[in-house]
Image: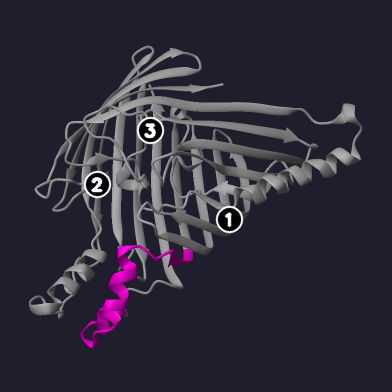
Amino acid sequence: MNTPKYTALCAAILAVFAGQARADDWPPVTISGFGTAALTASDTDDAEFIRPNQKAGVRTSPRTGVDSNFGIQGSAKLSDMISVTVQGLVRKNVTDNYGADMPWAFVKFKLSDDWNVRVGRTTLPIYFISDYRNVGYANTMLRPPAEVYRQVNGGATDGIDVQWQHSYGDSTVTAMGSIGRSRGPSRDGTAVTFHPVGDVLVQLENGPFTVRLGRAQATFDIVDLPGTPLATLLPQMRSVPAYAAALAQVPTENISGSFSSAGMSMDWNNIVVLSEYAMRRTDTRLVADTNSWYAMIGYRIGKFTPYYYHGEASQQSIRSFTGLPTSGPLAALTAGANAAIKVAEQSGDAFGLRWDFSKSAALKVQVDRVKPKGSAPFSFVNITNPAYSGPIKVYAAAIDFVF
């Protein structure tokens, strides 16, 4: 994403209002921030554990890059109706180096007590904790479950959204719709460009309970193929007539896709619950259809919250083509075609403990057990042992803070 463009946009908007006001009328800027300082390790040197879409991760030697990040946000209220928000985030993502991103950069127009419009860059609201999934302190678990939160890589959209929110007695109903463009880079050199992506969500809050339903619909391209396995595979398939039917199932442009999700949370009598279920569907076998879910439960004892979660991710579309040569000189090409449409599946369990030792900081420890289903799970990369089969344990300790 072109973050300098949005930095310049917000700066220009601020400059316009500055030119209309005396120096002593310049609106105050509110600065806030968050971060996670973490150490992560696994129990194997056969593969590296990663968060979704990271290029490199951790083996048995502890590293900081997997779960650590730092973010800072600035907001300026220009009038009773208009405000500007910009957020910067530093973390490791599609490269093995820390890099800066700008997940938020928008102008908000407050039309009434119930209606708001935002123009610019906002987070795709496809997950239950989309707005704050990078803010570790705001979440019970040390990291969002990869089984669900790996399904769509696009983290932000450049466009416009409209939000309506109204209270009815003890209940608050929120509805939002947005449309924009987004780009989800991948660690393997490819990227998914959405043009456009539209989404709607409805959320109901009542006391300790929150229920949220969402759906995103997009047309997208798989781009930046040079140097990737697909850049070699697809031309080879095109050169052999026997693969024509398979090629028709793996388009890379103008693909229709959807992501539907349902989630709920509860914080009642010291019991903490969070759960989501999601379905991804597309018109190309290169982005497989998946179902995924997780459920977490915790119990607050003073400043301590022990918790447990279980998650599952499975492929719903075909995992191999039928009718292709499986022996002779074309066997390797068929194996490559089948590998391209097969998504890794996994289940995960985690036990953790959160200690709120400060009003603005929490210490978390978490132990994960990740189990692949028939192939290497997507939580691991750079596999060095061909006999790798898991399950694998991951250990992490982190301090989350806000200011």
Position of residue 361 relative to residue 261, above or below, is above
Q: Pick whichever, 165 or 276, lies toward us.
A: 276
Inspect the image, locate mark 1, and give the three-letter code of the amino acid beneath it: Ser
- The spot of residue 208 in percent (x, y) is 45, 29
The span from disc 3 to disc 2 (Cα, nearest Å) is: 16 Å
Question: Residue at label 3?
Answer: 65
First of labels 3, 1 by sequence position: 3
Question: Residue at label 2?
Answer: 382
Q: Which residues are magenta?
A: 218-247
Residue pictured at 12% horizontal, 78% vertical:
329
The span from disc 3 to disc 1 (Cα, nearest Å) is: 32 Å
Q: Pick whichever, 387 or 147, lies toward us.
A: 387
SS category of the residue bearing label 1? strand
Looking at the image, the residue that sits furthest to the front is 227
Q: Pick whichever, 334 or 14, lies toward us.
A: 334
Dividing the picture into quadrants, the one containing residue 83 is: top right
